[in-house]
Image: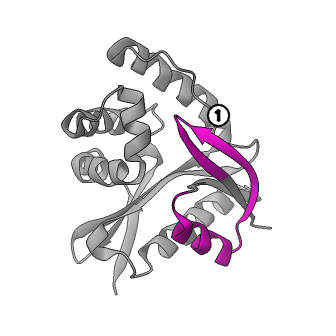
Amino acid sequence: MSLEIIPAQKKHASASAELILDAMEELIYFYLGEENKPEALRFLTDQFLLENSLYSYKHTQIAILRGKIVGVLIAYDSSKHQILQQLLKNYLEENYNFKDNLTPETEAGEFYVDAISINPSFRGQKIGSELLKHAEKLALKQKHSQIGLLVDLENPNAKRLYKRIGYQVVKSTSLGKHAYEHLQKQLY
């Protein structure tokens, strides 16, 4: 397998939006107030193209295999999360009549993996593991001693993968109307 992981560019917006939606469909529909896939893809594409967005291309790495985008990773310094989340909330209030509060997802001092998604046709080929290794390299490059992420309680396979490679549960939380666990891994 000749997998390449590169920083995303604006031209990757459409393919990335599809993968991001696959990873967090329920949350995106909660944000929008309806289950509308075309609107969700438009929203994610718009957010991807912004420089100051939780889902920006600036925080995104893409996995390419044989010329095809097969995976996406969104990860950033947790110190940026509160500001980016407030910008998202403002956008949702202005464009989607969003009235809820957004739960903080990160812990102070961690490098945060906001989303990781693999094209269903390419799952089981260790692409997710490679993206996580890449996230750890990015974290170390930015001098972070820990990396964190949320795992959906309804996704035991993902939780098993994370625990197998050293992540540990630090707390339970919820986003939208869904339960998650916050996991962290010490890098040094």
Left or right: 107 in relation to 71? right
Q: Nearer the viewer, residue 179 or 133?
A: 179
Q: Residue at x 77, y 59 (%)?
A: 145
Q: Residue at x 42, y 47 (%)?
A: 24
Q: In the rendered view, would you say 62 is above or below 107?
A: below
Q: Residue 104: x, y in percent? A: 64, 34
Q: Nearer the viewer, residue 90 or 21?
A: 21
Q: Nearer the viewer, residue 40 or 63?
A: 40
Q: Residue at x 61, y 40 (%)?
A: 174
Q: In the rendered view, would you say 162 is above or below 154?
A: below
- Looking at numbered disc 1 in the image, what kind of residue is underneath it? Pro
Residue 111 appears in view: yes
Residue 82 forms part of the magenta stretch: no
Residue at the extreme bottom of the image, as rendered? 1
Q: Residues within 10 Å of mark 1 (few under 14, many from 20)?
A: few
- Say which residue label 1 marks: 104
Tell me the quadrant of the picture where the C terminus can be found: bottom right
Q: Residue 22: x, y in percent? A: 34, 53
Left or right: 6 in relation to 34? right
Element at badge 1? Answer: loop
Left or right: 77 in relation to 90? right
Q: Residue 167: x, y in percent? A: 70, 67
Residue 165 appears in view: no
Tell me the quadrant of the picture where the N terminus can be found: bottom left
Q: How many marks?
A: 1
Q: Residue 42: x, y in percent? A: 23, 34
Q: Residue at x 24, y 53 (%)?
A: 15
Q: Which residues are magenta?
A: 154-181
Q: In the rendered view, would you say 182 is above or below 157?
A: above
Q: In the rendered view, would you say 40 is above or below 20?
A: above
Which image quadrant for residue 45?
Answer: top left
Which image quadrant for residue 70?
Answer: bottom left
